[in-house]
Image (spheres, rainbow, N blue to C red):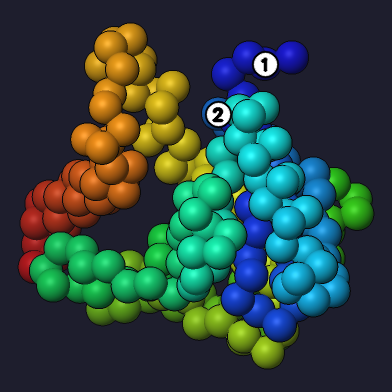
Amino acid sequence: MNNNQVKIFTASLGDPKKYKASAVYNGEQLIITQVALIGGTFISWKEPLVSEIIEKKEKGFACLIEDMTTYISQYATQYMLEDVSEGHGGRYRNNYQDAFDWYFALHNMGNLLFHKDCTAFEIKHGEAQKVEKTQDDKGRSIYKVDWSTFNGGHRAVLLCVVAAMIEPVSERYLEAMYGKEKIKEEEYDPWRTWKKITKDRDATERKVWQQHDGF
C-alpha cells in the first residue's frame, strides 16, 4: 500500500439530488471508488453525514464539501464550484473551470479511473456530451456545461479532483514545508495558502503568455 496516497471524501449538497463520493490519489492516478446518492430529508441524513465526515477526517481523509450553508461544511473544507476568483489581467473564472482543467488533464492522460459502479458519473467533453470545451482568444480553455444533464454525482467527482489537487495545503504538507512546529490554529488559514498557490499559478501562466506575446 502506498503510504503517500491521499484518501478523499466529498459531498455535493446544492443540487436537488445530493451525492457523496470517495476516491484515492497516489500522486499520479486518481481512482474514483464510490459515488452514492444521499437520500431522504435533511433531518434524516444530516447527522449520519456529519458523523461520516468526522470519522473520515480522523482516518486522514481530505474532506471537501460543496454546501452554501455551514451546517455540514463546518466539519470539513467548504468549496463552491460556482464561486468566482480573480486571476491575472483582471480575468475572473469560476472554480469549476479550474476543476475541469485538472479533470481533463488527468482524464486525457489515462490517470483518472472509475470503479465499474461509478462509470455513470464519468464526465466527457465534445459534441452531445455534458461539457463542451472551447478556447478564448488567448487559447485558454473555457468549459460550457449542460447543467440539465449534470447532477450532484458529477459535482462530487469534480470535488474529488479538486481535493487531490489542493491536498498540498493540508497539515501534513505544511509540516513537511515548515517543520514539526505546530502552527497555531488561529494563524492557519488554509484558503490563504490555497489562494497563494493559485496566485503563483497565475503568475507563472502570465509569464508564459508574455513570452509568447500573449498580452
Classify the position of the N terminus by image quarter.
top right
Give the amino acid at mark 2: Gly
Spatial CA distance of label 1 from label 2 is: 10 Å
- The amino acid sitting under disc 1 is Asn
Give how far across and how far down residue 214 sits, in percent: 14, 65
Crowdedness near tag 1: few (<14), some (14–19) or many (≥20) residues, C-alpha within 10 Å: few
Q: Residue at x 28, y 12 (%)?
A: 181
Residue at the location (53% across, 58% down)? 73
On the rendered structure, is 72 left or right of 186? right
Q: Could one spot residue 139 in this view of the protein?
A: no
Q: Earlier in the sequence, mark 1 or mark 2?
A: 1
Provide residue 136's location: percent of width, then percent of height: 31, 78
Task: Give how far across and how far down residue 132 sits, in percent.
Answer: 56, 79
Residue drawn at x 46%, y 60% as measured from the top left: 79
Query: Disc 1, disc 2: CB below 8 Å?
Result: yes
In front here: 103 or 157?
157
- 137 w.r.t. 73: above or below: below
In the image, residue 119 sits, relative to residue 124, either above or below, namely above
Q: Quadrant of residue 177?
A: top left
> Under tag 1, what secondary structure?
loop
Position of the C terminus, as image quadrant, is: bottom left
210 relative position to 187: left or right = left
The percent coordinates of residue 89 (x first, y second) are 11, 69
Q: As drawn, is 39 to the left or to the right of 164?
A: right
Residue 15 seen in render = yes
**Residue closest to the eye, 196 or 131:** 196
The residue singled out by tag 2 in the image is 27
Residue extending farthest to the bottom is 148
Q: Secondary structure at mark 2?
A: loop
Apparent side of residue 203 relative to residue 21 in the rendered image (left or right) = left
Q: Residue beneath label 1, please? A: 2
